[in-house]
């Protein structure tokens, strides 16, 4: 019996089958990768759509609060990254014409540089300061307020179901026309809407 011929014949029969199996298997893997990529792309598009939608709603809320509170400047300071917060930043802001914006000055400020204010923001549901020089005990925060002409500020903490997600700052360059109790109520109403739709702050690199 010619075993060499038999083996050669078997290889000739099996080889196309093995090759076909590997080709099929690779096609299946490629198809799965393609499906996964398409799903990831759709998920990212949906996330971007929802983020843009929620961002628009947040801007709408703080512009409404600016008008209702007769304020000069309203903005949101967000701790980040969530879960192990170490910095404070501002993305959402509404200001009246001629009023300096705070956003550019509040970008990734280490909480260690404003420990008193960071702790106060995390611990207190509502704060109101109408004497910045005497009542604000952080040099960095005090300098930021005074340099931008802040005469009085109300600060409303926002929480989701688990964490402190941000604080709304309502600022006045001159004596406020709105009573503090009214301001507190307006801030609370805005926070109820914003806190669950506020997108997590992302650093733009």
Image (cartoon, rainbow, N blue to C red):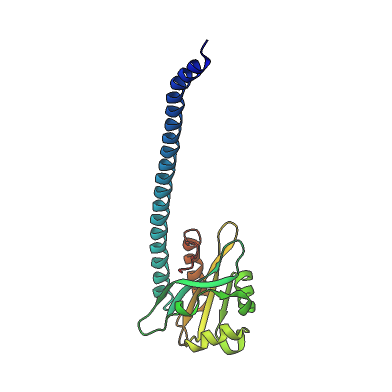
Give me the residue at 61% from left, 77% from top: 117
> How many numbered badges does the structure rendering display?
0
Foreground: 168 or 113? 113
Instruction: Report whether 40 appears left or right of 164.
Output: left
Evaluate whether residue 17 shows in this view: yes
Give me the residue at 54% from left, 67% from top: 166
> Residue 78: x and y, percent?
53, 69
Residue 135, relative to residue 194: is it above or below? below
Foreground: 62 or 4? 4
Evaluate whether residue 131 shows in this view: no
> Residue 147: x and y, percent?
49, 88
Instruction: Report whether 139 appears left or right of 73.
Output: right
Foreground: 160 or 109? 109
View extreme (left): residue: 97
Instruction: Report whether 161 appears left or right of 187.
Output: right
Residue 127 location, quadrant: bottom right
> Residue 88: x and y, percent?
55, 72
Give me the residue at 44% from left, 29% from top: 19
> Residue 184: x and y, percent?
52, 72
Instruction: Report whether 2 appears left or right of 96.
Output: right
View extreme (top): residue: 1
């Amino acid at each position: 019996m010619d075993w060499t011929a038999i083996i050669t014949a078997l290889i000739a029969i099996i080889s196309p089958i093995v090759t076909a199996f590997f080709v099929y298997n690779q096609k299946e893997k490629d198809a799965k990768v393609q499906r996964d990529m398409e799903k990831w792309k759709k998920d990212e598009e949906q996330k971007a759509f929802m983020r843009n939608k929620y961002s628009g709603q947040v801007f709408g809320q703080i512009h409404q609060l600016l008008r209702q509170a007769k304020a000069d400047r309203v903005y949101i300071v967000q701790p980040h990254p969530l879960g192990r917060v170490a910095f404070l930043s501002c993305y959402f802001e509404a200001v009246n014409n001629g009023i300096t914006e705070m956003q550019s000055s509040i970008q990734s400020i280490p909480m260690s540089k404003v420990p008193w204010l960071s702790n106060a923001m995390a611990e207190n549901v509502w704060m109101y300061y109408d004497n910045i020089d005497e009542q604000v005990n952080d040099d960095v925060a005090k300098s930021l307020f005074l340099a931008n002409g802040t005469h009085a500020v109300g600060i409303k903490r926002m929480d989701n179901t688990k964490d402190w997600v941000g604080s709304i700052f309502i600022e006045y360059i001159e004596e406020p026309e709105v009573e503090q109790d009214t301001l507190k109520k307006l801030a609370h109403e805005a926070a109820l809407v914003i806190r669950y739709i506020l997108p997590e702050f992302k650093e733009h690199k």
